[in-house]
Image (tube, grey):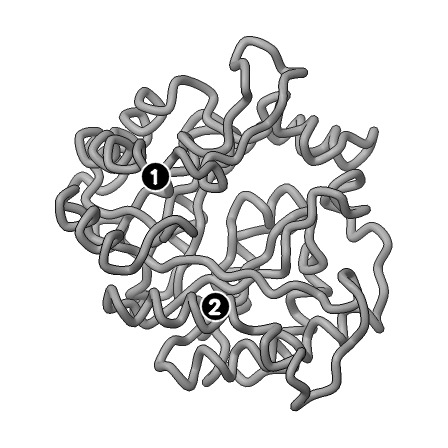
Amino acid sequence: MQPNRLRFALNAIQWINVKEDPDDLDSASLWRFADPAFVAEYPDVLREIRDAGFEATMLEVLDTQTLQNYGRMIEAAGLALAPGYVQVPLMSDHGPRYEKGSFERIHWFDAVRRKAEESNYVGLSTIFLAAEVDQTGSRWLRPAVGHDFSQDRLDELTDLIDEAVDVLNAEGVKPGLHNHVGTWIETRQEYEHVLNSIDGSRLGVSFDIGHLEWAGIDAKDAITTWSDRVQDLHLKDLDMELARRSREEPLTYERATDLGLYREPGLGQLDLPGILDALPDDFGGWIIIEVDRASMDPVDSARHTARWVADLTRD
């Protein structure tokens, strides 16, 4: 597909997934979206995204915001919105497996309902749907190789995703299955099992290009194989030598991130233009650039990324 026909947005993650002390790799890793104080800084981050050259950002309503407050903030920023993200936690990772129809199981999907409400409020009809990120889990310690695989666990998760899909579909939102290293949907076998179990009319696919390649999966081949279901993408570059080391030595997810696995587009070894070229001609979704840990100051990272997009899409 011609790059100048694609829609690009920037995830604010450069400002969010940071070290407490950027000069000390052993300092704590922070997730600013979870910091109650971040709501006061959010408008400035959105302004910096716009000033860098982007016209859209990913939907992300803070727990400390109402939909109305978030909507006013986005309007003031002058940005459009690209699809958001929802996680489906595995019941057996948190306790008992609740019976279908039970009070507890119905409420298991309250966060999914909230995400459907957010999407509808801002006029978005698709969403990225992923397994839960668990930073205490076994795959966080041994990422990108399908560590500790269990078919029973995958079947349980597939059933839960199927129910989450029903919740979203009922509200007019079509999810795209999203692969993520460190979760229970990490490998080709795992995402293909889910996609083959749930009809394409209900569940699309919204790959993370970097997480495919980190797990040793050819992203171009994945897009080609599932071209009739691809609806949105997350895009990032990688240090592929670090990706290899993380699988073979191994490195933990956090250590690989701290050492610089994630790169701005054009600063790693992925053939991102070639991967995007594999998209079908009728692709009408969003390309959300997501540099999970910036290799430079967040503003500089956003500006570099905007220049990369401008060069890619220049006629």
Q: Residues within 10 Å of mark 1 (few under 14, many from 20)?
A: some
> Closer to the camera, 216 or 136?
136
Using the rendered view, name the quadrant where residue 89 is placed. Answer: bottom right
Quadrant containing the N terminus in the rendered view:
bottom left
The residue that mark 2 highlights is: 176
Q: From mark 1 to mark 2, how far is it between C-alphas?
A: 28 Å
Horizontal and vertical percent position of residue 3: 27, 49
Amino acid type assigned to the residue bearing label 1 in the image: Val
Q: Is residue 281 left or right of residue 26?
A: left
Would residue 195 be visible to someone looking at this image? yes
Q: What SS does tag 2 mark?
A: strand
* Outermost residue to the top: 23
Please determine whether, in this image, residue 234 is positioned above or below residue 200: above
> Closer to the camera, 265 or 108?
108
Quadrant containing the C terminus in the rendered view:
top left
Number of marks in the image? 2
Using the rendered view, name the quadrant where residue 272 is placed. Answer: top left
Residue at 63%, 57% (x, y): give it. 132
The residue that mark 1 highlights is: 39
Q: What SS does tag 1 mark?
A: helix
